[in-house]
Each structure stands twice: as structure tokens, then as C-alpha cells.
């Protein structure tokens, strides 16, 4: 039960941060930029491209991990969608930074990125089913024995390049997310793992 609570809390925190990043209005994230670009080229909704990409990633992740297809990955997608809608369309609905000074946008963006990666670092510790997008950089890291930051930056760079080719809204925020997200996820992942390692013996650790 504790793991499920931390899992849900981690996803909630992740999408609070993601929503703040969106509100910072410094450009779409690399995945969002790709989906918007594909939408503009094909007229298919960005949300449909999101679903198509996640479906394809389920198979790619299974290949990288040399494991069976993890259909349960649809579960976190439903939770993520619910929290993203809650934060972006309800809680932060009235927040508008479009006309704010650059330093305000930059501060909001970095704050959102730190919060989002904190949430990712928390929820991946539970070892419960992860969304295909989050599982991808972990599967690549596991397969190639790379650091989490290396695999995340590699994926972000490839996706950003595809977004550019598709004509997506790549901006300053896209580049910052591409460069900073991997190192920040690795930072929080290391901190949480150390917290578990240092927990006194005989007591239930935070992710049990």
C-alpha cells in the first residue's frame, strides 16, 4: 500500500511540475513539440499521436529489456492524464505567464523542471509499472549500461531532432528540457536510492 501511495504521489508531483513548465511559456517539451509538429503535418490530433507513440514504445521497451510486452503500462497513462488535466486545466487554469518578463518565465520553468524530475525520481523507486516514455530511458540505460542522464539526453536529442523535422514548436524550453531533464532525474534517483540504503536495518524502508 505504501508503494502505491508513493507511486501515485510521484506521478502527481511529476505532472504538477510539467504543468508549471507548460505555463512558463518558454516552448514545448521535446515530446510535446514532436506531437504538435506531427499534428500540423497530418491533421491528426496531438493526443492521438501521443497514444500512437506510447503504443510503439511499449514494443521498443520490451525489445530493449528482452522481456514480454508490458500491457499494464496503460495504467500509469490513465493516472498521468488525470493529474495533468487536474493541474493544468483546473488548479493552474488562471495562471498566465505569456506576457511575464523572461526572468519570471525562466524561474517558473526551472522550478517546474525540478519538481517534475523530483516526481519521476520518486515514482520510479517503487518499481511499479511505469509509463512507456519513462520506461524508455530506463530500458535504454539498462540495455547499454549507460547512466540515466546519458540515456535521457540521448532520447531527448533524438526526439527534439524529429520535432524540428516535423516542424514542431521547438524553443528555449525544449532545449533546456533536453539538456537538464536527464541530469536532474539522475540526481533525484541517486538521492532516493541513498535514502533507502541508509535506512536503519529492521525498519520498513520508504519504498517497501
Image (spheres, rainbow, N blue to C red):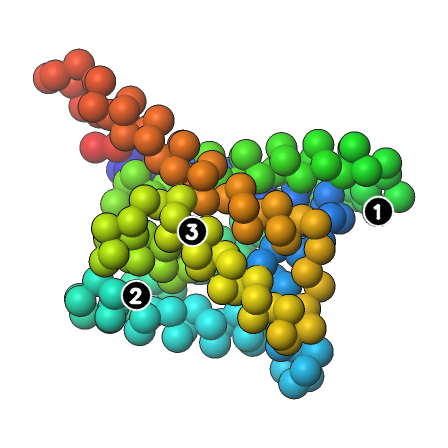
The residue wearing badge 2 is: 61
The one of 28 and 145 positioned closer to us in this rendering: 145
Disc nearer the start of the sequence (3/2): 2
Q: Label 1's element? A: loop
Q: Label 3's element? A: helix
Q: Looking at the picture, does residue 42 appear above or below residue 77?
A: below
Q: Residue at x 55, y 51 (%)?
A: 178
- In three-dimensional space, the C-alpha distance between marks 3 and 2, rounded to whole angstroms, equals 14 Å
Look at the image and tell me whether residue 118 can be seen: yes
- In three-dimensional space, the C-alpha distance between marks 3 and 1, rounded to whole angstroms, equals 28 Å
Question: What label does residue 98 carry, if any?
Answer: 1
Q: Quadrant of the C terminus?
A: top left
Query: Would you say the residues marked 3 and 1 are in contact, meaning their CB atoms lie under 8 Å apart?
Result: no
Q: Label 2's element? A: helix
Q: Would residue 56 appear left or right of 165 to someone viewing this image?
A: left
The one of 52 and 8 positioned closer to us in this rendering: 52
Q: Quadrant of the N terminus?
A: top left
The residue wearing badge 3 is: 152
Disc nearer the start of the sequence (3/1): 1
Percent x, y of residue 196:
24, 25
Look at the image and tell me whether residue 70 can be seen: no
Q: Looking at the picture, does residue 137 appear above or below residue 59?
A: above
Percent x, y of residue 111:
62, 33
Q: Report crowding for label 2: few under 14, some 14 to 19, many 20 or more residues within 10 A (C-alpha).
A: many
Amino acid at each position: 500500500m505504501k508503494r502505491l501511495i508513493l507511486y501515485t504521489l510521484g506521478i502527481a508531483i511529476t505532472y504538477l511540475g510539467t504543468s508549471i513548465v507548460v505555463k512558463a511559456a518558454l516552448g514545448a517539451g521535446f515530446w510535446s513539440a514532436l506531437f504538435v509538429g506531427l499534428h500540423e503535418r497530418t491533421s491528426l490530433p496531438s493526443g492521438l499521436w501521443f497514444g500512437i507513440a506510447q503504443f510503439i514504445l511499449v514494443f521498443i521497451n520490451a525489445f530493449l529489456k528482452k522481456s514480454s510486452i508490458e500491457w499494464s503500462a496503460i495504467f500509469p497513462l490513465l493516472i498521468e492524464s488525470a493529474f495533468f488535466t487536474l493541474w493544468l486545466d483546473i488548479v493552474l487554469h488562471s495562471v498566465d505567464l505569456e506576457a511575464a518578463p523572461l526572468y519570471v518565465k525562466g524561474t517558473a520553468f526551472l522550478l517546474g523542471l525540478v519538481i517534475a524530475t523530483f516526481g519521476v525520481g520518486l515514482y520510479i523507486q517503487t518499481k511499479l509499472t511505469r509509463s512507456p516514455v519513462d520506461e524508455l530511458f530506463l530500458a535504454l540505460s539498462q540495455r547499454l549500461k549507460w547512466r540515466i542522464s546519458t540515456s535521457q539526453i540521448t532520447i531527448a536529442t533524438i526526439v527534439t531532432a524529429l520535432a524540428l523535422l516535423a516542424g514542431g514548436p521547438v524553443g528555449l524550453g525544449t532545449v533546456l528540457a533536453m539538456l537538464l531533464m536527464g541530469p536532474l532525474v539522475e540526481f533525484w534517483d541517486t538521492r532516493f536510492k541513498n535514502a533507502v540504503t541508509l535506512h536503519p536495518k529492521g525498519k520498513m524502508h520508504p519504498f517497501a
